[in-house]
Amino acid sequence: MLNYSNLNDLEFEALCKDVMSRKLGRKLQRFGPGRDGGVDLTDDTYRRTTIVQVKHYIKSGFPALLTALKAEVPKVKENSPMEYYVCCSTKLTPDNKRDIYLLFSDYMASTANIISLIEIDDFLQEAENADILRKH
C-alpha cells in the first residue's frame, strides 16, 4: 500500500477528484477551501447530479469518519443528488460500508458508491492509472 498520510486534506481531495473522474467517466469539479454545503466534488455546480464527499480520516479511524458523515446527511438531503459517493482515506470493513450506506441509501446505488483507501490504492496500482499516481 502506498503512503497516503503525507497528503493534506486538499491534496487528498485532488487525488480523489482524479480517481473519481476516471472511475465515473466524467469530469468533476472541486472548489477552494471554505464552507462547501456538503459538496467537495460535483459534475455540475448548478444541478449537482453527482456529488462526491471526500473525507481524509487516515489517522482518525472509522468512528470519527462515521461521526463526520452523519453531519453530512442533512446537506445531502438538501442537495438531493441523483448519485452520491464517499471517497475516504480509511480502510473499511464490509460492516463499515454498510453503516455508511445506510446513512445515504436514498442517494447511493450500492456500497460500491463508497470508495475506501483500499479501493483507491488498488485503482492507482493498475497500469492504466499510472498517470494519476505520478501526478500525485
Image (cartoon, helix red, strand yellow):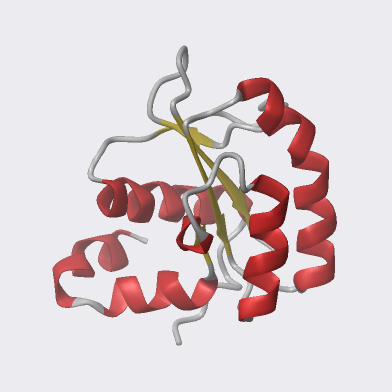
- The spot of residue 46 in percent (x, y) is 47, 12
> Which residue is the extreme one toward the bottom?
1
Q: In terms of image quadrants, where is residue 58?
A: bottom right
Of residues 31 and 110, the one drawn nearer to the viewer in this rendering: 110
Q: Which residue is drawn at 63% across and 68% down?
A: 97
Q: Looking at the image, is 9 positioned above or below residue 58? A: above
Query: Can residue 20 be seen in this snapshot?
Result: yes
- The spot of residue 124 in percent (x, y) is 31, 72
**Looking at the figure, which quarter contains the C terminus?**
bottom left
Of residues 83 and 27, the one drawn nearer to the viewer in this rendering: 83
**Looking at the figure, which quarter contains the N terminus?**
bottom left
Q: In terms of image quadrants, where is residue 19?
A: bottom left
Q: Residue at x 57, y 29 (%)?
A: 32
- The spot of residue 43 in percent (x, y) is 38, 29
Q: Residue at x 81, y 48 (%)?
A: 70
Q: Looking at the image, is 116 positioned above or below residue 107? A: below
> Which residue is the extreme one toward the top?
46
> Which residue is the extreme one toward the left?
128
Q: Give the number of callouts.
A: 0
Q: In terms of image quadrants, where is residue 23?
A: bottom left
Left or right of 48 on screen, residue 62: right
Q: Looking at the image, is 107 positioned above or below residue 54? A: above
Of residues 5 and 127, the one drawn nearer to the viewer in this rendering: 127
Left or right of 93 on screen, residue 71: right
Query: Can residue 92 be seen in this snapshot?
Result: no
Left or right of 81 on screen, residue 99: right
- The spot of residue 26 in percent (x, y) is 26, 38
Left or right of 132 on screen, residue 55: right
